[in-house]
Amino acid sequence: MGRSALVSTVAMLLASCAKQELPAPELESRVIPIITEGGVTFRDLDRDGALTPYEDWRLAPAERAKDLAARMTLEEKAGLMVVATLPANAPPGEPASGYDIAALTEAMGKARATHFISRLATENRALAEANNAVQEAAEGHRLGVPALIMTDPRHGYTELAGASVAGGQFSQWPNGVALGALDDPDFARSYAELVRDDLRAVGFAMLLGPQIDVASEPRWPRNFDTLGEDPQVSARVGRALVEGLQGGPAGVQPGGVAATIKHFAGYSASSTGFDAHNYYGRMAKLNITEWQQAIIPFTAALEAKPSGVMPAYSIIEELELRGKKLEPVGVAYQKVILTDILRDQLHFDGVILSDWAITADCNERCIEGAPEGEEPSFADISTGWGVQELTRPERFAKALDAGVDQFGGVDDPAPLLEAVRLGLVSEERIDESVRRILTQSFALGLFEDPYVDPARAEAEVGTAEEKARGREAMALSMVTLENDGSLPLKQGAKVLLSGLSDEAVEAAGLVPVSDPAEADFAILRTRSPSEMLHPGYVFGAMHQEGSLAFPEDHEALQFMESLPEGLPLVADVQLDRPAILTPFKPRANVLLASFGASDVALLDVLMGAVSPRGKLPFELPVSMAAVEAQRPGAPADSEAPLYALGYRWQAPSQ
C-alpha cells in the first residue's frame, strides 16, 4: 500500500471511530428539513433528501468543512470571508429592539454573508429572539450555512464603541485589567465560563476577545481592557480565559464561544500614546526584545487553541524580524508576522480575522479629522495604514497573501471577488481560508442547532447571583495603595462626598453631609484624567488621550484642597489608564485603585464586607516627564515610579 493510500485509510478509520463515539446532538430547524438515516437524524442542509457528508455531525469538523467548501460557489466563499454588521431596526443613535430582517435578507442575497457582528443592546429575551430571526433568515442559504453572530465584550464596566458593547441585562464585571490585578487563572476561567454561557444563551457564538495586549504604553487609551503590563500575568490569565470561553483547553467545543485573541502584536506600543484606530496614532515602536515580551501572552494563549486571532492595526517602527526591517504597513499586511511567526513558528491553524476597516479608503477626514464645528462620522473611518495607495482589490490580495482569512467590518465582498477575477488571488488561496472558517462553525455546533431558547435567556442570564459575583469581583480586584487604618468605616459615620451617589452611601449605612465641619470622613471617587485632543475624529472624541496628570483645576484636586485640615480622606481612582497619583499620596488616608467598579462595590470595601486583594497590573508613574522618557514598547520602564508594577499595600508587621 502506498503512503497516500495508507493516510487515506487511516483517516477513514478515524472518521469511523468518531461516528461511533459522538453523542447525538440536538437538532433544530425552522425551514430546513430533518432526515433520518440508519435511525440517526440529521439536518438536510442542502435539501436533497439524502445525507451529504457535510451534514453528518459524526464526521470531524475539518472533514465536513472540506466537503462543504467544494460545493460552494466563488460568490458564496467570498461572502463567508467578510464580517458584516447586523442592521438595527431603528435609526442610528436611537434604541433598537431587534434587527431589520428585510434589509438583512436582501444583504444576505446580494453579499452571501454568513458572519455578522451585533451591536444590539436590549433585553435578553428580545436579544435571543432577534438572533434567532437572523438564523431563520440564514436558513434560506442554498447550502443551509448558519449565521455566526459575534460580539465585542458585553460584561465589562466601561463601554467604548469599537471595543465593547453596553451590557444591557448582563451581569457587570470590572474591566479586563482587573483580571490582571487579581492574577488568578482559576478566577479568570470561571468568569470566562459565565461569559460563554451568557453569550451562547442569547445567540452569540464568537467573542472578539480576550484582549491580551501587554499594556506597555501608559498613555494608550485601551489599557483598561488588557490584562495589564506584566507579560507573564497576561499569559497565564489569557490562557485561562480562552479555556473558559471555548469550553476546554483543546480548542472550541460545541456550546462554547469562539475566542478571538487580540491584537497580535505590538498594538499597545503606540509611539505617541494615541490609538491606531486613528491616522495620527498609526505608528507603534518596538525593538526585538520588546517584541519578544509582547508575544508572550499570545504564545501561552495559543496553547489553548483559540479559534481566532486578530492582528494589530499599527505600523511597527524599528522592529526587525528574520533579519529584515518590516515594511511600513499595518500588521494585517505583514506576512512575516502572520505567516512566518503566527502560522509557522507558533503553529496557529485557526482563523485570522482582521480588525475593522483595514481595506476601507482613507479620505481627507480620515487623515485630517472633521472640520471644527462638524461631527466626525464612522463613514470616514479607515485603518488601512500604509496601503492607501493600493486599490481595494489589491488591499484584499495583500492581506490574504500575508495570512488574513476573514475581513472585519466589510458588508460587500465585491472587491475580494474582483481580486480573484484580476488574478491577484487564486481560488485555491480562497479555499484555504474558507475551510478554516467553516471548520470553526462546525466545531461550534451551529450546523446542528443555531437557535437559542429566549425563555432561558430571560431566566438564566444576568441573574441576581451573577450580578452579585460581578459586584464582588469589582471589589476584590481593587488595589490598596495607602491605608492608615481608617478602614472599615463605621455604620452611621457622617461623610462628605465627591463622585458617589447619596443613595448608595445611605444604603451602606453612612450619612451624607454637605458641611465639612460635620463630617467624620471625606470620600472621593474619580477616574484617570485625560484631555480632549482630537475631537474631529470618531475615536479621538471617545478615547482617553493626553496627559496622565491631574490638572490643577481638576474637580478631584479642588475637592481635596477644600477639605479642612485633619479631616480624613478616603480616595478611589478608577484607572482606565495609569494615572499620576502624586497629589493624592500625601493627602489621602486611604487610597484605592479600581478598574471599573460601582459605588456599591466600593462601599463593600469601605465597610469591610470585602477585602480587596488586587496588585497593580501596571506601574503608576511619578510624573509626566517620566512617562515621556519611557519606551512605549517596554513594560514597566518609567524611572522611579510612584507605585511599582505588582504593588499592594501591606499592613506593617506587628
Image: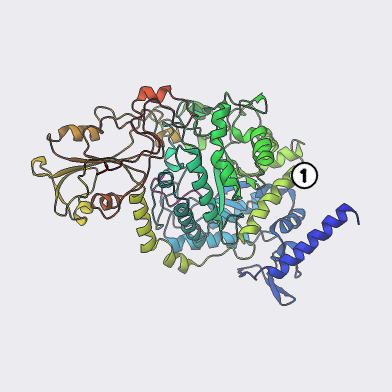
Residue 175 counted in the magenta span:
no
Q: Nearer the viewer, residue 419 or 609?
A: 609
Look at the image and tell me whether residue 487 can be seen: yes
Q: Main secondary structure of the magenta part?
A: loop
Residue farthest along the bottom direction in this orientation = 39
Q: Nearer the viewer, residue 210 or 413?
A: 210
**Quadrant (top left/top right/bottom left/bottom right) for the N terminus:** bottom right
Q: Position of residue 654 (x, y in %)?
A: 24, 44
Residue drawn at x 59%, y 49% is 306
Height in image: 593 above or below 191?
above
Residue drawn at x 54%, y 62% is 132
Residue drawn at x 76%, y 69% is 50
Which quadrant would residue 342 be assigned to in this image?
A: top right
Residue kind at label 1, given as amino acid type: Glu
Look at the image and tell me whether residue 365 can be seen: no
Height in image: 209 above or below 563?
below
Q: Which residue corresponds to mark 1?
A: 428
Circle 1 SS class: helix
Task: Give the magenta range.
Answer: 151-160
The answer to whether residue 480 is left or right of residue 100 is: left
Q: Position of residue 35 (x, y in %)?
A: 70, 73
Q: Position of residue 427 (x, y in %)?
A: 76, 44
The answer to whether residue 129 is left or right of residue 542 is: right
Residue farthest along the right direction in this orientation = 1
Q: Position of residue 281 (x, y in %)?
A: 49, 28
